[in-house]
Amino acid sequence: MDAFNGLMSGFQVAFSLQGILFVFIGVFVGTFIGMMPGLGPISAIAIMIPITYSMDPTVALVMMAGVYYGAIFGGSSSSILLNAPGVAGTVATAFDGYPMAQQGKAGKALAIAAIASFTGGTVSVILLMLFTPILSAVAVSFGPAEYFALMFLGLTAISSLSDGSTIKAFISATLGFMVVTIGIDSQTGTSRFTFGNPNLLEGIDFLVIALGLFALAEVSTLVLNRKDTTMNDNKDLGSLRISKEDFKEMSGPMTRQSFLGFLIGVLPGAGATIASFIAYITEKKLAKKPEEFGKGSIKGLAAPETANNAATGGAFVPLLSLGIPGSGTTAVLLGAFLVLGVQPGPLLIQDRPEVFWGIIASMYVGNIFLLILNLPLIPYIAKVLRIPRPLLISLVIIFSLIGVYAISFNTFDLYMLVVFGIIGFLMRMFSFPAAPFILAFILGGMMEQAFRQTLTISNGSLAIFLDKPIALTLIVVSLLTILVPLYTGRRKLKVNNEDHTGKTL
Amino acid sequence: MKKFLATAAAFTMLLAAGCSNQSSGETGKSGENGDWKPTQPIEITAPAGPGGGWDTTARMVSQVFEQEKMIEKRLPVVNKAGGGGAIGWAYIAGKKESEHHMFVASPPLVLVPLNGQSEYGYEDFTPLANVIADYGAFVVKADAKWNNLNDLFEDMKKDPTSVSVIGTSSPGSMDHMQFVKIAKAAGVDVTKIKYISDPDAGGLTAVLNGSVDVYTTGVAETIEQVKAGKIKVLGITSEERLEGEVLSDFQTAKEQGIDETFVNWRGFFGPPGMDPAAVKYYEEKFKELSDSPAWDEIRKKYGWGELYMDSKEYSEFLKKEAEDMEALLKELGLAR
C-alpha cells in the first residue's frame, strides 16, 4: 500500500503542468541528441546538467531521466538509416535495421523500432516499480566471476553473426580482441601497444570503431558503387504500416526481450549493449528462420530495440536503490543527482519518496510522449534517405567526424577514425563481417578485466568458476550454444552423406 | 574524380578541425608596479571528461568566481580528457607563460608521471593554490569479521594474500596508494597485497556481494551506504576526525595507532613559467574563494574538506608528497 501511495504522489509530480512540460523537454532533447550519430545519452545528460542547477530537484531529475531514455529511443534512427550506430546499445539495431532500410522499408523499420522501444521501455517501468526493492539484491549478486561468464555467453554470438564464413567471423573477432588491449591495462597499470603515444593510453573509444567500421566503411562502399543504380531506386521510405503478420512476428521477441533486457539492465556494468546483443542471439536461436537474420529480419530488429530500452529501465534499479551507477551514463546521471542535492541509495525511497516515485511515474508519461513524438516524425526522419547520395555521404562523414571529435576534443581520434574507416572498408571488400569485430571489442575488454579480477581473488585458481552457481550455469549454457549446433551440424552432414552414398549405390 | 573529391573533402575537414585546436592563448602583460589583472577570459582545464571530480571542482570554482564577482572576467571550463590526465597536462604545458590558463589537479599529477604515463609532472607547472581536500576510507561489508584497521592489518600481516582489496583506479594510482601507504605504516608486506582495479566503479558492488573484502575509496562515497547499514568504515586517512553527520563517527588510522595519513588534495596550477605577479593575484583570489560562504556551501554539498595552501606552501607540500610516493612505488616495483 505504501508503494501505491508513493506511486500516486509520483504521478502527482509527473502530471503537474511543470512535470509534463519538463518530461516532454527531456525526452524531446534526448531523442534529438540521440538521433545524431556520435552523440549518445552521456553527452545528452552532460549537456543538460548546467541547465538544471536552479531547478526543483524532482522536476530536474524527471527531465534528466527523460533525456536518458529519450536518447536511447532516438539512437536507433542513425543505425537504421545510415548504418552509423551512435551508441554501443544500438549496434545490434543496425544488423537488421539497415538492411531493411536498404530494401526500401525504412519507414517500417523505424516504426518497428519505435514500437519495440516503447514496449521495452514501458514493461521495464512496470517491473522497476514493482520489483526495485527485491531486485537491488540481484544487482549486487554479480561479482567478477559472474560477469566473466555473462560476457562469455555474449561472445557466443560471434558464430551467429557471421553470414558467410565462420572462420572469417573469428578472424574479425580476434582483431577486435587485439584492438581492445590497446591502452593502460587496468589490472597492472602497464601501457600496452601504445607505442609511447599518450593519446592511446586510454585505449580507443568505442565510437571511433563503430563509426569507422560501420558508417565510414558504408560510405566508401557507396562511393565505390555509385554507378550501381539499382540501389538508387529503392530509396523509398516505404509504408509505415505494420501488418498483422509483422506484428505477430514482433510480439514474441518483444515480450521475451522486455523481461530479459530489463534483468540484464539491472546488473551494473552489463547494460543496454549486452542486453541488445544477447537479445539478438537468443532470438536468432529461437527463430524458425534464422537465415533471415542480418538480411532485414523483423525479429532481428525488434529484439535488440526492445532489449536496449528495457535495459535502460533496469539500469535505474541499482542507481536508485543502491546508489551504484551501472554504466558511464548512469554515473553521469548520478553526478546530476548529487549536484541537485539528492543522494540516490538505499535510503532514497524513505528520505525523498517524491523523487523516487516521481521519476518512475514520469517514465510512463515519457514513454508515451516518445511514441507520440516519434511515430508521426518517422516520415520526416526517413527523408534523410531522400537526400541526394553525394550530399548524404558528405553529411555522414561530417557527423561521424563531429561525433568522434566531441568525445575528447582531440584531433588524434579523427585520424584513428579514418584508419578504422579504411580497415572497415578493406574488411568489406574481402567480406569479413564487421559485427564480430565490434562485439569482441565491446565485450573483450570487460571480459579480460573480469577474468583477471576473478583470478586475482582466487589466487590464480580456475576452480572459482565451479564454486559460483550463477557463473557455472552461464558457462554451461554458453558451451551448449557452441557445442549443440556443432553436433547437430555434423549429424546433418552425416545424414546427407548417407543419402549421397545411398544414391550412388 | 568524385571519389577523389570526397576524400579531399574529408581531409580538408580533418585539417580544419586540427587547426582550430591550436589557436587562442595570448599572454596578458603585468603592470609596471607588479600588479596584475586578467585582461581576457581565464580558461580552466579539467584534464578529464565531464562529471568527474576534476570537472566538478573546476566548474564549481568557475561558478563561484563568476557569480560572487570575485574575478571580473569569465572563466570557461574546458575538458581535455585522456591518458589519466596526460592529454590535458600536455595541453597546458604548451601554453607556456600564459597568464590566462590554469588547470585543476590532485594526486594523479604526482602519481601518473611516476608510473611513467606522462612526460609532464607537477614540477613542470606553476602551483597557484590548493583549495580542498578529500580523504581515503577503507570499507568492508557490514557483517565482516573486522571491526577496525588493526583487526584487518593483523590478518594481513599473517598472510597478505588472504585479503583482497578493490579500488577504481589502476595499481600505482590513488586508491591503491592510499591503502598501501597506511598498510605499510601498520607493518603489512605491501608487495604482496592483492589489489584489484575496477575502472567501472564496481568496487562497492564487489564488497557488498562478498567477491572482494576491502574497498578503498573516498570518504564522501561511503556515507549513504553506512547510513543504510550495508557497510562499515574501518578507518579513514585524515589527520583528525572529520566533521558532519556520520563522518564524525569514522575513526582515523592515526587514532588507531597507525601513524600515517593520505590527503587527496585538489588545487590549481598554471602553465610553466607563469608571471609571479599573476601567481600572486590568483593566490589571493583562491584565498578569498576558500573563505567565502558560497564556497563553504559547495564544500558541504560535495563533502569536501577545507585545505588552503598558497603557492609556496603548496610547492613544498608537493615535493614531500612526491618523495613519499616515489619511495612507495619503488618498493612496489611500479615506479618507472
Image: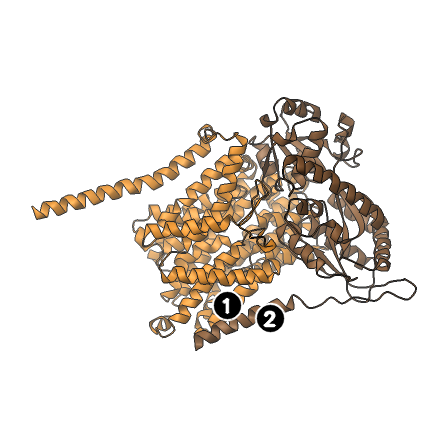
Q: Which mark is residue B16?
A: 2
Relative image position of residue A493 (x, y in whole percent): 21, 45
Name which residue lies at 66% across and 36% down: B216
Q: Which chain is brown?
A: B
Choose between B46 and A354: the one closer to the eye. Answer: B46
Q: Quadrant of residue A247?
A: bottom left
Residue B9 seen in render: yes
**In screen coordinates, is A248 left or right of B241?**
left
Residue A460 coordinates in the image, percent (x, y) = 50, 31
The amino acid type, in three-letter code, at marker 2 is Ala
The amino acid type of the residue labelled 1 equals Ile
* Rendered residue at 89%/62% (across/down): B35
Disc 1: which chain? Answer: A
Nearest the eye: A411 or A335: A411
The orange-tinted chain is A
Quarter of the figure with the N terminus of chain B: bottom left
What is the chain letter for disc 2? B
Q: Find the residue positioned furthest to the bottom.
A: B1
Report whether mark 1 lies on the same chain as mark 2: no
**Which residue is at the far left?**
A505
- Neighbor class of circle 2 (other Cα within 10 Å; few <14, some 14-19, many 20+) is few
**Location of mark 1 (residue):** A397
* 10 Å crowding of disc 1: few (<14), some (14-19), many (20+): many
* A93 and B196: which is toward the camera: B196
Picture quadrant of residue A297: bottom left
